[in-house]
Amino acid sequence: DAGVTQSPTHLIKTRGQHVTLRCSPISGHKSVSWYQQVLGQGPQFIFQYYEKEERGRGNFPDRFSARQFPNYSSELNVNALLLGDSALYLCASSLGGPNSGNTIYFGEGSWLTVV
Amino acid sequence: GNSVTQMEGPVTLSEEAFLTINCTYTATGYPSLFWYVQYPGEGLQLLLKATKADDKGSNKGFEATYRKETTSFHLEKGSVQVSDSAVYFCALSDRGGSNYKLTFGKGTLLTVNP
């Protein structure tokens, strides 16, 4: 079975531009979470979606937004990119929602470089 | 707010050496605690977890015990192998029994030499 898949794997953007990152969860999983991992740091929680509704938001500015589609795939959007947005963006999926206790599975991430 | 502090790396060991990676946390309530591992070129994988005080999580020879009195969750392995070389992250969720909204430490790079 395919794991969590993310696209693109690498991309370079210019300051002020917009970026969309995509994530397909493991088949049957209904929850998707997004994390930002800056080089040398641990991942930081951005969003969690379950059954197409936002169930949690981390301490990120409004330039960051996300959505989940009827097939449970998800997009993370970042507007007005800053140099500090350069990071590895990780998507994770799990079978159930925030209180389920299910194991979450991470994708390999999308490397974003802002120049 | 929640926070996780891990020992600074990198850690370099010889094969069959004993491993300890320290992890302490600050959280409200009764968090669940996790160790994740990131092998080179791969995504994060759950290594082990503990959901309440005095629980011991174990997997692949690694162990960690949830110590509420010392707010710690140290990772140990009795005999490391070259294949254990990776970055190890300690993490917590403040929603008991859940993996919701994980807070991670900065990670510890482990290199095991033959």
Image: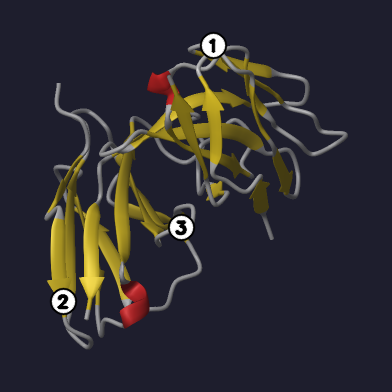
User: Tag 1's secondary structure?
Assistant: loop
* Crowdedness near tag 1: few (<14), some (14–19) or many (≥20) residues, C-alpha within 10 Å: few
Label placed on residue A13: 2
Whether tag 3 and tag 1 are in contact, CB under 8 A, the answer is: no
Q: Give a yes or no on whether discs 2 and 1 share a subunit.
A: no
Label 1 is placed on what type of residue? Gly
Q: Residue furthest right?
A: B69
User: Tag 3's secondary structure?
Assistant: loop
Instruction: Report whether B49 appears left or right of B112.
Output: right
Task: Tell me residue B51's x, y (percent).
Answer: 64, 27
Q: From mark 3 to mark 2, how far is it between C-alphas?
A: 21 Å
Whether tag 3 and tag 2 are in contact, CB under 8 A, the answer is: no
Residue A82, quarter of picture: bottom left
Label 3 is placed on what type of residue? Gly
Instruction: Report whether A57 appears left or right of B78.
Output: left
* Foreground residue among A14 and A98: A14
Q: From mark 2 to mark 1, how far is it between C-alphas?
A: 43 Å
Instruction: Report whether A80 appears left or right of B19.
Output: left
The C terminus of chain B appears in which quarter of the rendering? top left
> Which residue does the numbered mark 3 point to in the structure image?
A40
| A77 in relation to A111, above or below | below
The N terminus of chain B appears in which quarter of the rendering? bottom right
Q: How many marks?
A: 3
| B5 in relation to A82, above or below | above
Instruction: Report whether B38 appears left or right of B33.
Output: left
| A54 in relation to B82, above or below | below
> Which residue does the numbered mark 1 point to in the structure image?
B61
